[in-house]
Image (cartoon, rainbow, N blue to C red):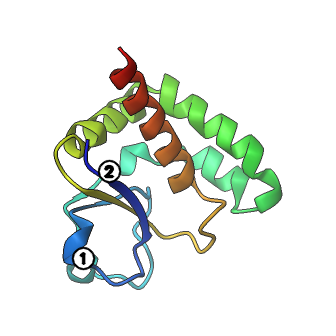
Amino acid sequence: MRDLFLKRIYDPSSEVDGYRILIDRLWPRGITKEDAKLTRWVKDIAPSHELRKWFGHKPERFAEFRDKYLMELQSNEQQSRAVEQIITLATNNRVTLLYAAKDPIHNHARVLLEELLRRINEKIDL
């Protein structure tokens, strides 16, 4: 298993990023597709529109948002498949998950990374 990293899409790209995967449902403002230097855009892995709107990037809602988003990632077939695709890609490659949120702690990318690592560890323990 190679490395999984989180990075704001507004931060400069680097050769060490490896595969650059945008994990937001909406395209980030002010970023051109050329500047993004994406390998892939996986919209389906992002929180549902309803959950994203409810959360509104309010830190006081983060714990509940985390629980609800983890539930989506585990029960929504499309999201779960997207998680498995990233795990497969990360098996032999460095992967940087890109997000646009300003808050580096209270965002869906952190929750997604948690789920990715949980599933990877689960596979290792088998």
Question: Is label 1 in a helix, a strand or a loop?
Answer: helix
The residue singled out by tag 1 in the image is: 33
Residue at image point 39% right, 68% down: 27
Crowd tier of the residue under label 2, counting other residues whose Cα lies within 10 Å: few below 14, some 14–19, many 20 or above: some
Q: Which quadrant is home to the N terminus?
A: top left
Q: Are marks 2 and 1 in contact (CB under 8 Å)?
A: no
- Mark 2 lies on a secondary structure that is loop
The disc labelled 1 sits on which kind of residue? Answer: Lys
Question: In the rendered image, which residue does mark 2 sit on?
Answer: 42
Residue 111 placement (x, y as % from top left): 56, 46
User: Which numbered dot is residue 3?
Assistant: none
Residue at x 28% of width, y 79% of height: 13
Marked residue nearer the N-terminal end (2 or 1): 1
The residue carrying pointer 1 sits among few (fewer than 14), some (14 to 19) or many (20 or more) residues within 10 Å by Cα, namely few
Position of residue 98 relative to residue 61, above or below, is below
Furthest toward the top, the residue is 126
- In the image shown, does 125 or 34 lie closer to the viewer? 125
Locate the C terminus and report the quarter of the image it occupies.
top left
Extreme residue in the front direction? 125
Q: Position of residue 50 (x, y in %)?
A: 63, 45
Q: Which one is in front, 42 or 126? A: 126
Left or right of residue 71, residue 9 in this image? left
**Residue visible at 20% across and 43% down in the picture:** 89
Q: Percent from the top left, x then y, of residue 63?
A: 75, 45
Q: Give the alpha-carbon distance from disc 2 to disc 1, as whole Å.
A: 14 Å
